[in-house]
Image (cartoon, helix red, strand yellow):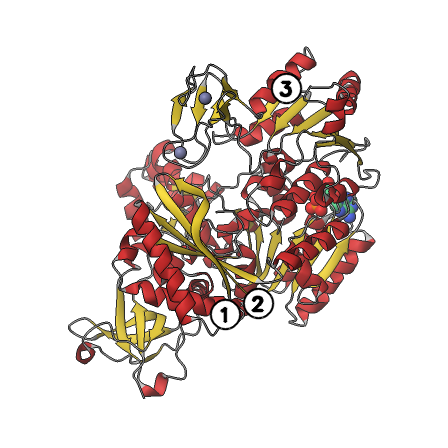
Amino acid sequence: MSKLYADIIINISHEALDKVFQYEVPFVLREKIEPGMQVIVPFGRGNKEQMGYVIRLSQKADYDEMRIKPILRISEKGVSIESKMIRLAYWIREQYGSTMIQALRTVLPSSSKVERKLQKTIWLTDSEDGLSFLEKAKKKHRKAQVRLLEELLKHSPLSWELVTRQLKIPRSTLERLEEQKIIRIETKHRYRNPISFTEEMKPPKQLNEEQQKIADEFKSDFVQNIHKTYLLHGVTGSGKTEVYMAAIDTVLEQGRQAIVLIPEIALTYQTVKRFYQRFGDRISIMNSKLSQGERYDQMLRAQNGEIDIMIGPRSALFTPFQNLGLIVIDEEHESSYKSESVPKYHARETAIARASMEQASVILGSATPSIESYQKAISGTYRLWRLNYRANLGSAMANVYVEDLREELKCGNRSLFSRRLKAMIDDRLKRGQQIMLFLNRRGYAGFVSCRSCGHVLKCPHCDVSMTAHRGGKLVCHYCGHQIPMPKNCPKCGSLYIGAFGIGTQKVENLVQKEFPGVRTLRMDMDTTRKKHSYEEILSAFSNGEADILIGTQMIVKGHDFANTTLVGILAADMSLYANDFRASERTFQLLTQAAGRAGRGNLPGDVVIQTYNPEHYSIVAAAKQDYQLFFEQEIAYREVLMYPPMCQMMVIFIGCKELDIGEAAANMIGKEIKSYFQSMEELSMHGPSQAAITKIKDTYRYVIYLKHKEYHALIIVKNHLEKYMEDKKIFEKAQVTFDFNPMIGY
Ligand code: ADP
Ligand code: ZN
Ligand code: ZN
């Protein structure tokens, strides 16, 4: 029998992660050992016993076999949270493709460059002793001692800062009193807490019948240790968040913890406040605006049991709770749940994997579930729950009007606004109600071209058209490259060069022209660069500082604006032309969510969708707010063209600074797949070919698409290719990454 080896890390801090040591697995441990396990190994010259974690098993020795020492035994300490996270990293590596180090860096908190904050406090050991000591000190006229004891008798503990700075007690006095055991000085790590509310807690809302049934079912399952993945499909405003909070109550009652994933953009002050009012200091948050130290502290607080609920975007999934009971994923259809960098893991699948490893439950929630999840729910893999009505009685669903822009043009209306939308805006302005205008720019760039020869201005580093900005600048949205707007066409010299398409800035100008005196706010990539600008714009709008909020997809999430009674969607179909198979799904989601913004208070709402494609099923279904209708058409389309979830897909992406090397590398991989997997009949391959965007930041891009019914078959291909590439020089220059069931076009 061949030997078995284990890669072991001794220290799990990020900086030390790539120090991997190989040990031999003794025969008696072969059946037991697994990635993540804690083992005891002989370490260093003196063979001192050390605890380490197994991160990988293999049959190949990476060093001289004679020099590889054997593992001594499996640690008796039980399964630590670190072990669990390492096991999860192993799963991620296997499932999505990456090195083990990359996977470990994804799941373990990063402590590098974090300065520790210490907090000292001073306690009175015993109040009776304190009192008698005070009397003595008074007699002896020891003023510092008197000041300190009088204060401590009123309040103990006192902070070190207060005692040394305000009370001006010398250090020597403190030391002497500590020696005599009159006081005690405590030193603790101070964890930074990103939440600073002083709000009163609020009792939970009385759940309505629909909500209560779901909460009861969850509770009944949970207390019986039945752990499932539930999909909560509920229209916007149906009270999904209240259901999550009821489920979390159950989880906390059982002494377990919960993670709530929310898209970063929806993680607003309002959301956090709602959770705070319900659960108080037992919550913490994670987001990209926190410093590395603050984030690390939240991880420690979770691990030490100081908090029970972590709210945050994708990365919060890796919160090291000791006894995780529930993972909630709100807006589960959001593409931000998929990592853009290697390992390209999907938080939804990874959450389900983590939950199954730790006997926890998962609740996915959305008004517009992903096709994947809904498919799993109706086929019984997930438990499907529905909330059909808005929870706030009186806030009915909005009326939706679809306006055909081709008809408008036929009637001579060349403006940005259909006649209906214009009339409705006028009406709302008169009534002092608010309006949101949503410009769907996804998969679309406001490009500059020559009307004489058709030349399109492209970024010299990326194969994408430049976008015109205010002040005569052209900007590349992929790499940030800027050039001044040329006066003549660089190709034919003609003067007829200009920007086509429309951006939010332009919309704002047109709105102000069309409705003189109107107050506008604009929210897009440009206006939300600063730390709090996103929230500032939303709260300004909420406070009625503007009549019209104009924005990109950013505005469709987040707040409820009670006074917003009209939502206009200016160009609904833009996102239909994106170069990936999810274009219709994304369009439907955006339109449905945008429509859900209207009439959330007591005033009825209207939505106007302007489009050149009024017959397209994603627009028809969004206008009717009919998810079922959309799902049926979309799943049929995926079935015909064999797209996920009707098959599994793996994109092999090859990026290279040198054109011919990139092409050669892509061809090598293509050939290897063809020859090695020729007997795998169900495997279909497209490519290698240039990506739709052939170059970004001077990197040439190639892709190979593989499809198979079974995810596992694709993993086999990936694993084979990882080995195949291992010792070939060309792959040092050509970077190859894997993307399973991609969320983006290449
Ligand atoms: P969703 O998460 O589905 O969009 P929310 O949980 O945010 O919905 O609820 C929408 C609004 O309805 C919120 O203002 C919430 O406070 C309110 N709400 C939810 N459930 C109830 C309930 N059972 N009784 C009264 N108001 C409720
Ligand atoms: Zn030209
Ligand atoms: Zn560029």
For marks 2 and 3 on the same chain, the one whose residue lies earlier in the sequence: 3
Q: Position of residue 510 (x, y in %)?
A: 63, 17
Viewer-nearest of labels 1 and 3? 1
Residue drawn at x 47%, y 64% is 95
Indicate the secondary structure of the residue bearing disc 3: strand
Instruction: Look at mark 1 in the image and give the residue it sits on.
Output: 713
Amino acid of disc 2: Lys
Alpha carbon of mark 1 to alpha carbon of mark 3: how far?
53 Å
Disc 2 and disc 1 in contact, CB within 8 angstroms: yes
Looking at the image, which is closer to me, 143 or 382? 382
Instruction: Look at mark 3 in the image and give the residue it sits on.
Output: 520
Amino acid of disc 1: Ala
Q: Residues within 10 Å of mark 2 (few under 14, many from 20)?
A: some
Q: Residues within 10 Å of mark 1 (few under 14, many from 20)?
A: some
Query: Is residue 83 visible to us here?
Result: no
Indicate the secondary structure of the residue bearing disc 2: loop
Alpha carbon of mark 2 to alpha carbon of mark 3: how far?
50 Å
Q: Residue 709 has which mark?
A: 2
Quadrant field for ligand 3: top left
Q: Residue furthest left?
A: 45
Q: Position of residue 136 (x, y in %)?
A: 36, 44
Q: Residue furthest top?
A: 516
Q: Is residue 647 above or below residue 432?
A: below
